[in-house]
Image (cartoon, grey):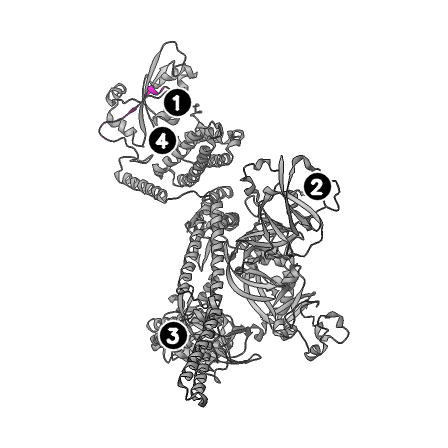
Amino acid sequence: MEKQFTTFYIGEMHCGIDILLVKEINRQLEISEVAGAPIFIRGLLNLRGQIITVIDIGVRLGFAARQPTARSRCIVLKTTAELALLPHSAELEEETTGEMVGLFVDRIGDMITALDKEVQAPPANFGNIDSRYLSGVIQRETDLLVILKTGAALSSEKNSA
Amino acid sequence: MSEPDDDILDELIIESKEHLENIEPNLLALEKEGGKVSGEIINSIFRAIHSIKGGFGFYGLKNIQGLSHAMESVLMQVRDGKIAISPPMADALLAGVDKLRMMLDDVKASESCPIEAECTQLLQLLQGDQQSFPPAATEKVVAQFSPVAGLDRFGLTAEQIRARMRNGQHLYHLAIHCPADLGRHNRSGAQLLVALAEIGDIIASDPSQADIQALAGDEEQPATLDILYATVLDQDFLVKTIGIADSGCVAVRCAGKGQGEHESAAGQPPENPEAAQEDKEAAAAALRKTKKQDRVETIRVKVSLLNNLMALAGELVLGRNQMKQALNRKISSALSSTAALKRFEAGLANSRKILHGSIQSDPRLKDENRKNDRLLAAVDRELGQVLNNFRYSLGFNLIDMPGISGLMQNVDLVTSKLQNNIMNTRMQPVDAVFSKFPRLIRDMAKKLGKEIQLTVEGSDVELDKSVIETLGDPLTHLIRNCADHGIETPAVRTAAGKTSFGKILLRAHHEAGMVNIDIIDDGAGLDVERIVDKAISAGCISREEAAMLTHEEAMALIFTPGLSTAQVVSDVSGRGVGMDVVRTNIEKLGGEVGIDSTPGKGTRINLKLPLTLAIIPSLIISAGGRTFAVPQVNLEELVRIRARDIEEKIEEIQNRPVLRLRNKLLPLIRLDETLGMERTYVDSKGVRRPDLRKGIIDRRGATAGNGEETVDENEKDTPEERRKTPSRRVRAANALNILVLKVGPDRYGLIVERLFDNEEIVVKPLSSYFHNCPFYCGTTIMGDGRVAMILDAAGLAEAAGLKFADTIKKEGALQADRFQREAMREAQSLLLFRNGTAELFAVNLAMVARIEKISAVSIKQIGDLEYITYEGSSMRILRLHHFLPVQEPAATPETFYVIIPKLVADPMGIVASKIVDIIATSEEINRKTITGPGIIGSLSLAEGLIVVLNIYSLFEAADPSRAKAGDEHDKLRGIRVLLAEDTGFFRAVIHNYLESIGCEVEVARDGMEAWEMLGQAAYDLLVTDIVMPGLDGIELTERVRDASALKHMPIIALTSLMGESDRARILAAGVDAYETKLDREHLLQTIGEVMSGRMHRPATPAAVR
C-alpha cells in the first residue's frame, strides 16, 4: 500500500511523518519561550486562540538547539481525538498526543510517496539518534528518509536515554 | 445483551442513580420521623426501588434485581404498617442503597458483586416471614369484578373492607388453583401464606387460613382457594410476585366511596379527621415540592461541549480586547492626523495670505491687473493641490468611523454577558456536595455514639462545576472533623449544661464576590493548648515561638502537616493528615480557609471560594523580558524599593535576601533566577545585559576600579561614564519591584522586572509537558496575542526552596522589642501621588479601594463635572486643584490614574498624574501648617512635604449636598470628647471628624494617658482605639466601668480588627458600641445613637447592649 509522508529537515537530516498526522504547517509565528520547561520544548504558540506546545524535534532526537531562520516552520499535528475522526483511523500506525502540539523544524521538504515495503527497519544505531524515536528508513536515490515514531517522540516523559 | 440496547441501559443507569439520590434523603427522613412520616415518602422510595428492580430485571442483571427486590420487600412491610422503621432497618436499607450505587457504577461487573450480606441483613428484618419467592411471569388478563359477588362469600361488610383499604392499598380477589398454582411451583399452602403475608394482608379466605396451611400443594384433588387480599402492589406486579395466573387475580373496587388511595398515611387512625387533614396537606406539600423540582426545564449537555463554549467565549473576549486596542490606536492616530491636517491647513492659509499680500502690494504687478489676478488664482490652485496631496497622503488615517465607539461598547457588553451566561452553564448548586452530608453525619453519629443534628443552609448557592468537584473531599474532611473532634458525647454535653445533641450548621452564602461556606458546630471547640503542645512535640515550632503566638496563630497551627489532636485516633478521622490537605486544596481553588473557636462553645470554619476558575483577575508582570500573570488572589501588596534604599532595607539571612517590611521580615526570591533564566538587567542605553552580581545587595558594580573590574565588563567601553556616577545601578530602572505573595499564612516577596496592568485573564490548562514545572499553574493569551504563563505562588516558593520557618525565627528576635512603645505604634500606610505638579499628596491606603488607569478620552463631561465609567456605573472624578489651594498642573496628560476610595458612600475618584509610592510611617501629622477643607494636615518625610488629604471633607467641598448630612449631627455640637488613639494618623483623622460636627476634642496618645486625663477633667464621651501600647482599649474600658465616678460614661471603641471573637471581646468589656476606624458616616451616626440613648436612659452600659 502507498503511503504519503510530509518531510522536513533537521540540520541535514531528512525526516518524514505520515501526512495524515499533520494538521497544518505554519510559518514561524511568535513562539513564547517558557522558562524552566524541558529542554526539548521550544515554547508555546498561539494558533488562533489555541495554545500549542512547540516541540523542538531536533533536540528530542539529540541535536543541539538551532536558531530559528526564515525557513523554520512549525508542523502542527492532529490530536488523538482528531485522528480518531479519520475514516481509516484504525489503520494508522503512528499516534500523536491528546493535546495540541507542533514540531519545530528547520525547513520543509517535499511530500514523498512510498510503498509500505520500501520502509525498512531502522538500523540499531543511526548516527547518534535514539532509535526509540525512529520507526523506519526509506532508502532513496539521493538520500535516506528517516521516518519518525511520533508517539514516542511526543511523549512528555524525560529523555531518559 | 445486544449492542443497540446499550444506550437504553445507559439511560436506565442514569435514571436509577437519580432514584438512589432521592431515596437516601427520604430514607433518612423516614428514620427520623418514624411512624409520623407521610405515606407519600414511603411510596416514593418504594416506587424508586421498584423501578430499579423492574428495569434491571429486564436486562437480566440478577444481582441488582435481587437486592432491590429484597429492599422492596422490606419497604412493603413498612408501607403496610406491618413493621415500624427502625435504625437497624435504616442501616440495612442504606447499605442496600450503597451497594446498588456501587453496582450501578459498573453494571457489567454487577453480576459478580456479592449481595448476600445486604440481602441477609434485609431478610433478617422480615424474620418470621421467611423469604420471598422468585417471581414468575404469566399471561395477563384484566377483569372487572363486581364487589358484591366476592364480598358476600367472605361475609364482610363494605365498611369493613373500606377500613382495610385506607392506607392506599389495593384490594384483590385472588383465585389460587391447586395444583396449578401451588403444585407447579412446588410449594405448600403454608409457603403460599408466608409469601402473601410478606407483601400484603390476607383479609379473608375461603377455605380458612388454617385449611390452606394444611395443604401440601401437590394434592390430586383440584381446588380453588379464594382469598381477599390487600396490598400496595399493582396487579401485574402482584401476580408475578406470588406466581399465579393473571386471571386468578381480580381487583376489587368498592362502589360509592373511593378506594382510599393516598387519603391517609400509614398507621394513622382514620377516625381523627384533623390529623388526616394535616397529613393530606403535608403530602400535598411534598408532592408540590417534587412537582416544582420537576418543572425546571433541563437538558443534558456534555461537559466537553460546555468547555468548548467556554474556550470560544474566552477567545471572543480576547478578540474583543485586541480589537479595542487596535481601535484605540486607530482613533488616536486619526485624531493626531486630523490635528496635523488642521495645523497644515492653518499654515497654508497663512502662507496664502502672505503671498496674496505680497502679490497685491508688488508695484511691478500693480498696473497689470489681470496678471495680478491670474497669479493669485495660480497660487490658490497650487496651494489647494498641496493641501489635497497632503490630505491624500494621510489617507486612511483620516477616515474616522462614526459611531464606532458605540458599536464597540455594544460588542463589549454582549461579549461580557455571553461569557457570564456560558460560565453560568457550568454552575451547579452546592447541594451536589452538601446532599451527601446528612447521611455521613448519621453514620458517624451512630459509630461514635453521639447525637448530632445537621442543619444545611444555602444549598442552592451555585459554584463552578470544577470548584464543586474539588470541594467534596476537603468539605467531607471538615464535616468529619466536626463530628469526630468537635461534638462531644451526650454525657459530656449534658455535664457541660448543653443539649445532649450537638448541632452542626453547614451554610453557603455569597459575600464580596466569593462564595462563603461556614461549618459551625457547638462542640468542645479547639483545645489551643493541646494544639500548641502537639506542635512543640512534633517539632513544628519551638517553645519560644509558641510563647509568642497569638490566639489566632495558635489556632492556625492545626493546618500544620502532621498534627491531629483527637485523643483517640479513630477510623473516621484523626489520622493527622487532613487539615493541611484541606487548606492546600482550598487554596488551589484560589480560596481561603479561616478558623475561629471558643473553648466549650464551638468552632467555626469559614471557606471562601471563587465562583469560577476559568477567568481570574491577575497582575501582569515581566521578568527577563518575558511576560507572566500573577493571580490576584495570591497577591497581597506591591512594594517598590528605590535603588538607593536597597542597601538599607534589604538584608541577608543565611545568604538569602530578606526585606524588612513593617517590622516583619519578608524572604525574597528573584523570579528570573527561580525559573532558571539568565539574570539580566537593562542598562542605561536600554540594552539587556547579563547581571553578574551575586545578590541583590551586592553592589560590586559600584566598587569598580578597586580590583573587581572583571565583574562588570559590559560597559567597560565607557569608563568615564562609569566614574561619573558613584553607583551606576542607582537609577529608577534599578529599583526593585516586589510582589508580596501569600502562601497560606506565609508571605514572601517576588522580585520582578516590570509591573503592567491588572487584567482579567482566561485560564487555559497547562500542557502536560510542563508537569515538572511547579511554578506554573496555567497559561493564558495576552491582549497582544502572545502566550504568557500564570505563576503559582506556592510552586514558586517550593522551587526556590523557601523555608518560612527560618524567617519566622529571625522575626521572633525582631519582635522581641515590640513591647517597646514606639515599635508597637500602628504604622499607617499612605499612598503618595502627584497631581501633575511637584506637590506630593497622600491618602491613607486603608481608604483606597482601587487605583485605575484611565485615558483622557474616556472621561465624559456633564456640565462642569467629569465622570468615568467604573464597574458599570458612572463615577464622578475630582481634580485636586479645583478644590484645594494647590498648584494647577500645566498640561492634562493623556492617561492618568484615578484613586477610588472605599469606606465612603458614593465615592468619587481622585485624579492623580502619577502614583509615587506607598510608605509606612508612624510620624505625627502636622495639623497646623497646611490646613483647609479637604486637608488633614501635612507630613514632612524623606520624600518631601506631603499634603495628607481628608477624603470626606474633600468630597463635601466637591459636592456641597454631602455636607448637609453633617447637619444631622447638630445635637452633638459642643459635647466634650476624649479621644484615645496611639496612631498619629488616625488620631488626626478622627479628631478632624469629631471637630467637623462641633465636638470639643481632647486627645490622649495611649490608654494610660487617657486614664489620667479622665481623672482630671469631665468628658461626655470616650472614643478609644483598641490596640494601644501599655493600657489597651479593652483594659481602659474595664477600668472606666470599674470606677464609680465614671462607670456610666459612654464609650465607643474604634477598631481595625473585625473578627467575631474580637467583637465579642470588645463588647464584653462594656463598651457601648464599636466602629471601624475610618468609616466617618457610621462613626458619627453611632456617636449620635449612643449619645441620644444615653440622654434618655442612663442605665448601666453593659445592659444596654
Q: What residue would you read off at disc 4?
A: B80
- Which mark is first along the chain, 3 or 1? 1
> Do marks 1 and 4 both belong to one polypeptide chain?
yes
SS class, disc 1: helix
Query: In terms of image quadrants, where is residue B220?
Result: top left
In the image, is residue B252 part of the stretch drawn in magenta? yes
Badge 3 vs badge 4, beta-carbon distance below 8 Å = no
Name the residue at 60% across, 57% down. A32
Chain hosting mark 2? A
Badge 1 vs badge 4, beta-carbon distance below 8 Å = no
> Do marks 3 and 4 both belong to one polypeptide chain?
yes
User: Distance of mark 1 from mark 4, alpha carbons?
Assistant: 17 Å
Relative vertical location of residue B1069 with respect to residue A13 in this rendering, above or below: below
Name the residue at 69% across, 80% down. B724
Relative vertical location of residue B611 with respect to residue B366 in this rendering, above or below: above
Circle 1 crowding by C-alpha within 10 Å: few under 14, some 14–19, many from 20: many
The front one of A137 and B528 is: A137
Closer to the observer: label 1 or label 3? 3
Q: What residue would you read off at disc 3?
A: B865
Badge 3 vs badge 2, beta-carbon distance below 8 Å = no
For this view, does A142 lie left or right of residue B164?
Answer: right
* Disc 3 residue type (three-letter): Leu
User: Distance of mark 3 from mark 4, alpha carbons?
Assistant: 78 Å
Q: What residue would you read off at disc 1?
A: B242
Range drawn in magenta: B238-257
* Disc 4 residue type (three-letter): Asp
> Do marks 2 and 1 both belong to one polypeptide chain?
no
The residue lying furthest to the left in this view is B256
Q: Position of residue B634 (x, y in %)?
A: 55, 60
- Which mark is first along the chain, 4 or 3? 4
